[in-house]
Image (cartoon, helix red, strand yellow):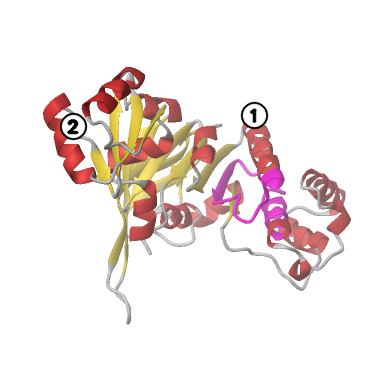
């Protein structure tokens, strides 16, 4: 059975006093298999967080359907919530309580109590390296430490489906590595994990990713398969005349590079053999030429027709 099924989900934010109506999700459909680590990858404003909140039962979509472990999260969200472990971008900690007190109250919300709750809290404190800080008020902790408490609190009850919205936000590199090791161990134990991210290396860790842009899924598949769709190497050229050089490359070689400011980008099989032809054809006009294997960012550009960074800027 698929753990998560989303079909034709649309979500519109209505017009407000200082903003116009906006369609955040447009006919989004996908499924996540039980035990899969699935990523929603995209720039800010692409629709990731809206979809995440719908799956977390924060609000229903404008139209479409969604189910988690066979339970309709729109018609019966109360039956879905006990199955979920949800970590939002915004913290849900009580800053006037200690680390341990936050975990106690979080565990009780999911029906844990007594020795089993204490043992589980001790386990999570150890795993997230919080044992020495268990008596500290959460309001006194750094952002990275609060994030670790947030993760420990929301995974206490060993949920079957884990939803994480940009989970590594605020974590230092070591804590981020620990987080992903923990997520992979949860996956190995049978948990289904769905995470949003705008970081390409986190997308590469997922079994499959759905790439979202402007409320639509523009690509869906295993990271390796999405990169393989590009079918060659990626050549990036820096030049003082991007527009003119692009047209000349098209006339001479029959391939049209994409232009982004002072950069040209093209996809080419055996790119290492093509670069000397470019250098020889346009002496002195190429400031730099680089060759790389396709990345998820290239997959985004290939399907969305624009760079990830450009999409980020457009959403601001």
Q: Position of residue 77 (x, y in %)?
A: 49, 55
- Between 164 and 117, the one nearer to me in the picture: 164
Q: Is residue 158 magenta?
A: yes
- Between 99 and 269, the one nearer to me in the picture: 269
Q: Could one spot residue 127 in this view of the protein?
A: yes
Residue 141 falls in image quadrant = bottom right
Q: Residue furthest front?
A: 284
Q: Could one spot residue 70 in this view of the protein?
A: no
Q: Is residue 52 magenta?
A: no
Q: Position of residue 15 (x, y in %)?
A: 29, 74
Q: Position of residue 112 (x, y in %)?
A: 76, 52
Q: Residue at x 68, y 52 (%)?
A: 151
- Between 50 and 42, the one nearer to me in the picture: 42
Label annotation for residue 269: none
Q: Which residues are magenta?
A: 146-175
Q: Nearer the viewer, mark 1 or mark 2?
A: 2
User: According to the image, label 2 marks what residue?
Assistant: 249
Q: Is residue 299 above or below residue 171?
A: above
Tell me whether circle 1 and circle 2 mark residues in contact (CB < 8 Å).
no
User: According to the image, label 1 marks what residue?
Assistant: 188
Q: Residue at x 53, y 56 (%)?
A: 78
């Amino acid at each position: 059975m698929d753990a998560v099924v989303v079909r034709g989900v649309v979500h519109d934010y209505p017009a407000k006093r200082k903003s116009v109506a906006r369609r955040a999700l447009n006919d989004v459909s996908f499924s996540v298999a039980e035990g899969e680590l699935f990523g929603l990858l995209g720039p800010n404003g692409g629709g990731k967080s809206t979809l995440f909140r719908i799956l977390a039962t924060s609000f229903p979509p404008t139209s479409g359907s969604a189910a988690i472990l066979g339970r309709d999260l729109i018609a019966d969200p109360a039956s879905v919530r006990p199955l979920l472990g949800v970590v939002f971008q915004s913290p849900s900690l009580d800053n006037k309580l200690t680390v341990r007190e936050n975990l106690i109250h979080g565990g009780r919300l999911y029906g844990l109590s007594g020795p089993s709750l204490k043992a589980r809290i001790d386990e999570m404190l150890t795993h997230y390296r919080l044992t020495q800080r268990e008596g500290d008020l959460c309001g006194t902790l750094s952002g990275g430490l609060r994030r670790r408490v947030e993760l420990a609190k929301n995974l206490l009850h060993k949920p079957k489906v884990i939803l994480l919205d940009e989970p590594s936000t605020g974590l230092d590199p070591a804590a981020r590595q620990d987080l992903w090791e923990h997520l992979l161990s949860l996956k190995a134990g049978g948990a289904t994990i769905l995470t949003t991210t705008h970081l390409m290396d986190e997308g590469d860790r997922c079994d499959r990713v759905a790439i979202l842009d402007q409320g639509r899924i523009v690509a869906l598949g295993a990271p390796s398969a999405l990169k393989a769709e590009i079918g060659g190497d990626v050549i990036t050229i820096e030049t003082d005349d991007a527009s003119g050089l692009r047209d000349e490359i098209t006339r001479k070689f029959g391939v049209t590079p994409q232009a982004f400011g002072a950069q040209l980008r093209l996809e080419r099989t055996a790119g290492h053999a093509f670069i000397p032809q470019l250098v020889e054809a346009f002496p002195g006009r190429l400031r730099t030429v680089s060759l790389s294997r396709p990345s998820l960012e290239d997959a985004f550009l290939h399907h969305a027709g624009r760079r990830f960074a450009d999409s980020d800027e457009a959403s601001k």
